[in-house]
Amino acid sequence: MTGAEPDPRRWRALAVTLTAGFMTLLDVSIVNTALPSMQRDLNTGAGTIQWVVSGYALAFGLVLVTGGRLGDALGRRRMFLLALAGFVATSALAGAAPDPATLVAARLAQGCAAGMLTPQNSGLIQDLFRGAERGRAFGMFGAVVGISTAVGPVLGGVILALFGDPDGWRWVFYVNVPIGVVAFGLAMKLLPRTDRRKFRLRTEIDFAGIALLAVAVLGVLLPLVQSERGGLGRFWWLFGVAIVFGAAFVWWERRVTRKNRPPLLDIRLFTGTPGYASGAAVGALYFCGFAGIWLVFALFFQQGLGYTPLQSGLAVTPFALSSAVTAAVAGRLVARFGRRLTVAGLSIVALALLSVGVVVQLVPPSAAGFAVAGPLLIGGIGGGMVISPNTTLTLECVPNRLAGVAGGALQTGQRIGTAIGTAVLASVFESVVATSGHQTALTAAMCCAAGLTLVALAFATLELRARRRRAILTEDQQAAQSAANIHRT
């Protein structure tokens, strides 16, 4: 087999990486259901136990770019195995935690392992697949995102029901261990090895860049993940810190590049790679609009309608399931329809969110759960047309040697968008519910989410036009080259 031939094990390798990715994404949503049980068993306050969720999300977002760069430098197989082993070990530690401090520390470490693992998925897809196959692979990744979102609250409820109190919550973490061990063994066998080369940590890893970016991302994420408990008011000054360190990071990375040393994140990805900057903006803005609706729905169904966490999770399942199915289909269509797919998907999501806001005003509260199922189902169809095609198109022109860090930066933007959207939509909901009730508050939040989605649609439309201009330019260059060849013969 030559280097140009596809790896015959690529689809089995993809199945292994998606299994690991499923576990890391599942741990974002499955734990929410078990929080009350954890709080009772460990005899701690709501503020401490909330860090079981927010600490994982914070650590996850902090290390995505670093994890991608390490995968590019050390080899994706090696980083995947190290990160997966760390994720399994910290899952076991979280399940066995004797006190709240150990549990929170384990979740922070687990989030770091998950953040290191996730960029290897997109990097391996870039390495193993080409052309239409790459779109199909990213489509499957998008389906995994949708499925993990859908089954997290339900699976968490089932585990708690099976194992009961007081220790049922521990099995929410223990469930990762056997799955992770099997995935590790299969990854050892199926993931392609990279050529061994001499690697000097001090010269090839930009430690100053890692520190600057970490402070910048922390300055954005920490106030936002704390916003539910007044953190936005107490930590607003960190946004200024984020701006300063973000600017310092860009300056430093350009300096490192000028000296011909490997940067943490090559800024030329954004300035010189066709479609990358606009695609990253579309992804961040879409997550800003859509990811925050899950907290708003939880507040509406549980506080406003008296649903249990499991019932609340089931009520929003139509979006997640239809998104999963459509993402798999869209992965097959992206090579044919390109950016038009994301433009159509964003339009559908925006209309669906507005429809939810209208529907809850027209039906009695007791019927709201059933009434929003239809719009959410349609919104999920649009959502599936956004995430995986946008990832495919954004990374389309990225060199394979930068695939890991490019994927990590893309997902960091999505994490920041999620944090911003969640804080904004929750604030809108809480400010309206005090004076106008839960239904009006949901309508206000859905209109805000639709507005953010429309901003993402504007960026996607601009990128669609830019792609058409690039295609015309490429055709003109090819025609000129052909004419030159004719004149030479």
Image (spheres, helix red, strand yellow):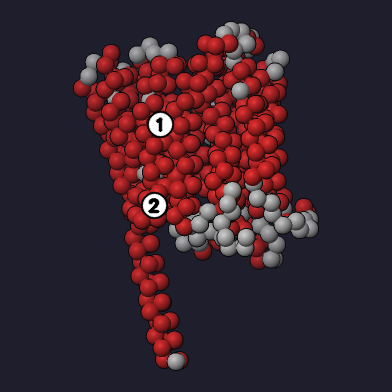
Instruction: Work out which quarter of the rendered image holds the N terminus and state it.
Output: bottom right
Find numbered disc 2 in the image and state the secondary structure of the residue it sits on.
Answer: helix
Which quadrant of the view contains residue 162? top right
Give whichever of 188, 289 is nearer the camera: 188
How far across and down, in percent of the image, does residue 248 sit? Answer: 62, 52
Relative placement, left or right, of 465 versus 144 is: left
Indicate left or right for 134 with 235 as reference. left
Q: Is residue 10 left or right of residue 106?
A: left
Q: Position of residue 328 (x, y in %)?
A: 42, 42
| Residue at position x 31%, y 19% in the image | 369
Residue 16: quarter of image: top right
Q: In the drawing, what numbered circle is on residue 370?
A: none
Q: Amino acid at mark 1?
A: Ala
Cβ–Cβ under 8 Å for marks 1 and 2: no
Q: Is residue 34 above or below residue 336?
A: above
Q: Identify which residue is drawn at 55% across, 40% down.
A: 15
Q: Tell me which amino acid carries mark 2.
A: Val
From the image, tell me which residue sits under label 1.
320
Residue 430 image position (x, y, % from top left):
39, 23
Question: Does residue 455 appear in the picture of this structure?
Answer: no
Question: Percent x, y for residue 363?
Answer: 22, 19
Tell how many labels.
2
Q: On the image, which quarter does residue 163 sit in?
A: top right
* Number of residues whose C-alpha sits closer than 10 Å to that of mark 2, classed few (under 14), some (14–19) or many (20 or more): many
Residue 1 visible in this rendered orientation of the protein? yes
> In the rendered image, which residue does mark 2 sit on?
334
Query: Which is closer to the viewer, label 1 or label 2?
Result: 2
| Residue positioned 66% across, 66% down in the render | 258
Label 1 sits on a secondary structure element that is helix
Q: Residue at x 44, y 92 (%)?
A: 489
In 3D space, how far apart are the residues under numbered discs 1 and 2 (Cα atoms)? Answer: 20 Å
